[in-house]
Image (tube, rainbow, N blue to C red):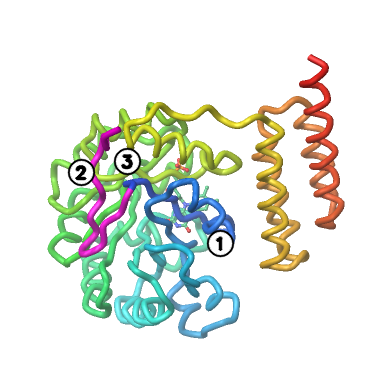
Amino acid sequence: MSRQVAPLQIGGIQVWPPLVLAPMSGVTNRTMRALYKPFGLGLTVTEFVSCNALAYGSKRTMEMIDQHGLEKPVATQLWGDDPEMMAQAARVVRECGADIVDINFGCPAPKVTKTNGGSACLRDPQRCEAIMRAVVAAVDCPVMMKMRLGWSEGALVYEEVAKRAQEAGIQAVTLHARTARQFYKGSADWEHIARLKRAVDIPVIGNGDLDDAQVALQRMRDTGVDAIMLGRATLGNPWLISQIVDLMEGRPAAPLPSSADRLRFCMVHYRTMVQELGEARAVPQMRKHVALYLKGMPGAAILRERIMHIDSGDAALAVLEETIARLESSSTAA
Ligand SMILES: Cc1cc2nc3c(=O)[nH]c(=O)nc-3n(C[C@H](O)[C@H](O)[C@H](O)COP(=O)(O)O)c2cc1C
């Protein structure tokens, strides 16, 4: 078996496999990342953290940046529009265990862009550069940056911002190939990712709409990117991660698990979230995860509805157990 792709090198950190879990606010917390890491992720990124919130050091924010050492390497992602605040925040997250600092120039959410953060920074590439220079100077670890194509179709600045990133000492750049204005509409345009790869020497991580192992590898080959990042398609289906790793390591992709096995893992996910976050926080968060694990299963819509109205972990786990038993008895009957 031989590796089909090369490791990703981010400064002095070698990442194998070159497969990154996308940061997803409200989803990829520490528990979730630790659960998905063993499927074979090379790198994980925290949910984005506001540099202003970090200056206040609230318990919830500090929890988000505390890296307890299960994931190596891990990148902590920051957003903000002020270079000095971002530099201070970078120092804090580095002290709290980040192996890499990631700068967010991609978030299109109005609550972020109205304060000129996230993708709104792309309206001012000079400011992007000032932020990147300040963060790079503040820490002794590699800094990466994640962006969209630009604010809108008429202002595609990704090449310019990536070139400034390279000049500023950024060690890798992730491109989600949509504009901010697009939010999640349309599809990610991988032609732009290929163009970016040709335009800069620093590693490029391609992101957007990957939901199939073969296609993911093909995208890597076609565009020449150094790594791929996957987000939504892994939710409820972390086995997609292992399938991609299989292909990267030169093996045929393992088949996806049975519905019952998927739900067994969902139960592990549920219990771990309750243990680590407590029931009050875990139950609402798990509703969306359970819905995703159920996707495509017989009777999924009814089960989803039941889970939506349950507010105790034990009751949700009982529904899952009952569903597993039903799935197994119908498969033995068949
Ligand atoms: C619920 C959700 C939350 C997200 N939060 C973040 C975030 O905190 N930081 C970030 O850079 N991108 C965030 N993203 C964008 C993803 O990292 C990724 O770029 C996007 O989902 C496209 O990749 P995908 O098609 O593989 O999901 C988020 C996306 C979703 C769906």
Given contact means CB atoms under 8 Å apart, are the residues at marks 2 and 3 in contact? no
Question: Looking at the image, which is closer to me, 328 or 318?
Answer: 328
Q: Which one is nearer the viewer's eye here, 33 or 229?
A: 33
* Residue matched to label 3: 153
List x then y, in percent, for residue 244: 41, 36
Residue 126, percent from left and from top:
21, 65
Q: Given the image, on which type of amino acid does mark 2 rest? A: Leu
- Residue at mark 1: 29
Residue 10 sits inside the magenta stretch = yes
Question: Which residue matches tag 2?
Answer: 196
Where residue 129 appears, as percent x and y from the top left, is 21, 66
Foreground tag (2 vs 1): 1
User: At x 50% / y 72%, what residue is drawn?
Assistant: 68
Secondary structure found at label 3: loop
Q: Which residues are magenta?
A: 1-16
Furthest residue toward bottom: 56
Of the numbered discs 2 and 3, the one sitting upstream in the chain is 3
